[in-house]
Amino acid sequence: MIDRQPVLGGERVALRPSTPDDREPLFAVARDREIWAMHPAHDRWQRPVFDTFFDEGLAAGGALTLIDRADGAIIGATRYGPFDPASGEIEIGWTYLARSHWRTGHNREAKRLMLAHIFRWAETVVFHVGEDNHRSRTAVEALGALARPGRLLIERAGVPAPHIVYALARP
């Protein structure tokens, strides 16, 4: 059985299953508008929008809270999407990180931990990245993910937003 809510740890970051108690510390991170500036869902800094996003993550399973190992602070969140056994694919995404931890290696380490864990079951990990989200596109490309041809339209607040689908095969 695939484990989409593991406890993982590296040098910089620890990941654990998100709980309802994480709502307030995660909103404290997510209310920074700059985090969402390039994201297709650029309004997640607003309380009602964040609450819906947070509740969806808990309901879907696979939601993980990121913790800075240096001081134990909650610094963001990420998720595993549903696993498709027919294709062997799973999505990693919905990630946001406190700006204080950008360009520190925390996000890269979290993704590497997640990849190492999930490749025990999945053949391929996909990332759906907003076409204009150059920061996230650069991050997944640095992991070695390659863009698939074409664009995927994902509805955000009733408006289709173009996304690039990146794929990373099991090593």
Image (cartoon, helix red, strand yellow):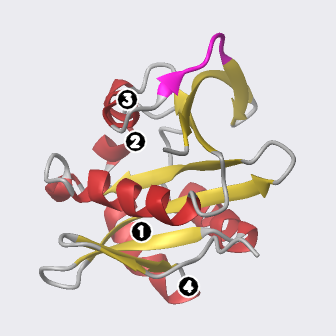
Secondary structure at badge 4 equals: loop
Q: Position of residue 55 (x, y in %)?
A: 66, 70
Residue 28 on image: x %, y %: 34, 69
Can you identify the residue that label 1 sits on?
A: 27
Check disc 4 and report the residue beneath it. Answer: 19
Badge 1 vs badge 2, beta-carbon distance below 8 Å = no
Residue 139, given in percent of the width and then of the height, sits at 33, 36
Work out whether mark 4 precedes mark 1 in sequence or the reverse, and give the earlier one: 4
User: Of the numbered discs in the image, which one, if any, rests on residue 153?
Assistant: none
Real-space CA distance between mark 1 and mark 2, rounded to the nearest whole angstrom: 13 Å
Please name the residue that numbered disc 2 is placed on.
36
Name the front one of labels 4 and 2: 4
The residue segment tinted magenta is 146-151
The circle drawn on residue 141 is 3
Amino acid of disc 4: Thr
What is the C-alpha distance between the residues marked 4 and 1? 13 Å
| Nearest-to-viewer mark from 3 and 1 | 3
Q: Mark 3 and mark 2 in contact (Cβ < 8 Å)?
A: no
For residue 120, what is the image quadrant?
bottom right
Q: Residue at coordinates 80% horizontally, 42% vertically from top-left?
A: 87
Query: Image check: 98 left or right of 16?
Result: left
**Pointers 4 and 1 in contact (CB under 8 A)?**
no
* Mark in the foreground, 4 or 1: 4
Q: Earlier in the sequence, mark 3 or mark 4?
A: 4
Upstream in sequence: badge 2 or badge 3: 2
Left or right position of 45 against 106: right
Residue sitting at the far bottom: 21
Q: Is residue 26 left or right of residue 89?
A: left
Mark 1 lies on a secondary structure that is helix
The kind of residue on which mark 3 rests is Glu
At 39% across and 63% down in the image, what residue appears? Answer: 113
